[in-house]
Amino acid sequence: MIAAALYFAFACFGLGLLFCLWRVVFGPNPADRILALDTMVINVIALLVLYGIAEGTAVYFEASMLVAMVGFVSTVAYCRFVLRGDIIE
């Protein structure tokens, strides 16, 4: 039963990634693209956690923490670039 739930969750988060990719490509303004990229990071984190549950190893949980940190920093940097035109003052 848990395998069916994992496959369903994989499909849902994969579909969410595709929708976010569509928003990144066809977003009307940069703010929508930034939000879509941030949501893609969250979906990738969820997929890594689900894969870690499916495999039964803790390595993927640590990888998801690294992706979360890098995703946060990249979102802040991209927002600063869009708002100010420069990342480092």
Image (cartoon, grey):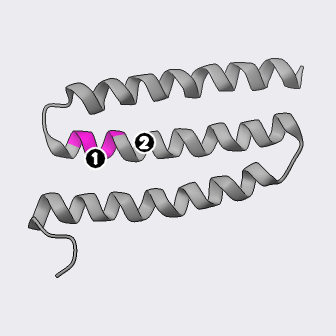
Amino acid type shown at disc 2: Thr
The residue tagged 2 is 39
The tag earlier along the polypeptide, 1 or 2, is 1
Amino acid type shown at disc 1: Ile
Give the residues drawn in magenta, as a range.
Answer: 32-36
Magenta-span inclusion, residue 34:
yes
Q: Measured from the top left, where is residue 31 in percent x and y?
A: 20, 46
Q: Measured from the top left, where is residue 82 in percent x and y?
A: 15, 57
**Residue 50 location, quadrant:** top right
Q: Is residue 38 left or right of residue 81?
A: right
**Residue at point 16%, 82% (across, down):** 89
In-front residue for pair 86/34: 86
Q: Is residue 20 left or right of residue 68?
A: left
- Badge 1: how crowded within 10 Å, few (<14), some, or many (20+)? many
- Look at the numbered disc 2 and give the secondary structure of its residue: helix
Q: Measured from the top left, where is residue 69 in percent x and y?
A: 52, 64
Q: Is residue 67 left or right of residue 6?
A: left
Residue 76's disc is none
The residue tagged 1 is 34
- Badge 2: how crowded within 10 Å, few (<14), some, or many (20+)? some
Quadrant the N terminus occupies = top right
**Residue at point 64%, 37% (across, down):** 47
Query: Majority secondary structure of the magenta segment?
Result: helix
- Look at the numbered disc 1 and give the secondary structure of its residue: helix
**Residue at point 21%, 77% (across, down):** 88
Q: CA distance from mark 1 to mark 2?
A: 9 Å
